[in-house]
Image (cartoon, grey):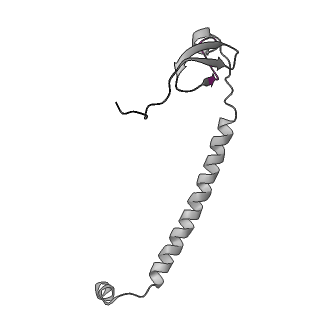
Amino acid sequence: MKAKIHPQFFEEVQVVCACGNKFMTGSTVNSITVEVCNKCHPLYTGEHRFVDTKGKVEKFQKKQKLAAEMQKKLSSSKVKKEEKAEKKTKSLRELLQES
């Protein structure tokens, strides 16, 4: 194995859940925070509850708006490029191919 390319591994890292549950594990990160653990996950507890995603839906909708704007911008620039290509002077070879 190569030297100095492997991340530092911490044997005892504390994982803290949003429900307050804490447990130890090994990781390359000093501390870990999670939203759902085995003590509060609906699959393990049998409870049906809503898990808050902290604005992930709004973040996704924001990305969709930006993508739509970029699509409009790209289509307008594509039209401009086509117009510019039509205005370009044609070579003799292109003129002969058209006729």
Give percent across and percent down for residue 53: 66, 30
Q: Give the range drawn in magenta.
A: 32-39
Q: Measuring 49% from the left and 79% from the top, which residue is drawn there?
A: 84
Q: Considering only vertical position in the picture, is 60 above or below 27?
A: below
- Please identify the quadrant where the N terminus is shown: top left
In the rendered view, tell whether residue 72 sits above or below residue 40. below
- Nearest the viewer among 5 and 41 is 5
For the point 29% across and 88% down, which residue is it?
96
* Dominant secondary structure, magenta: loop
User: Which quadrant is home to the C terminus?
Assistant: bottom left
Q: Where is residue 22 in the image (x, y as percent from the top left)?
A: 65, 13
Residue 14, quarter of the rendered image: top right
Q: Where is residue 35 in the image (x, y as percent from the top left)?
A: 64, 23
Q: Magenta span has 88?
A: no
Query: Is 84 left or right of 91, judged from the image as shown?
Result: right
Q: With respect to residue 35, does 65 lie above or below?
A: below
Q: How many labels does the image show?
A: 0
x 50%, y 78%: residue: 83
Who's the residue at 54% across and 69% down the image? 77
The picture places residue 85, in percent across and down from the top left corner, at 45, 79
Quadrant of res 89: bottom left
- Is 80 drawn above or below residue 27 in the view shown? below
Which residue extends farthest bottom?
92
Farthest front residue in view: 3
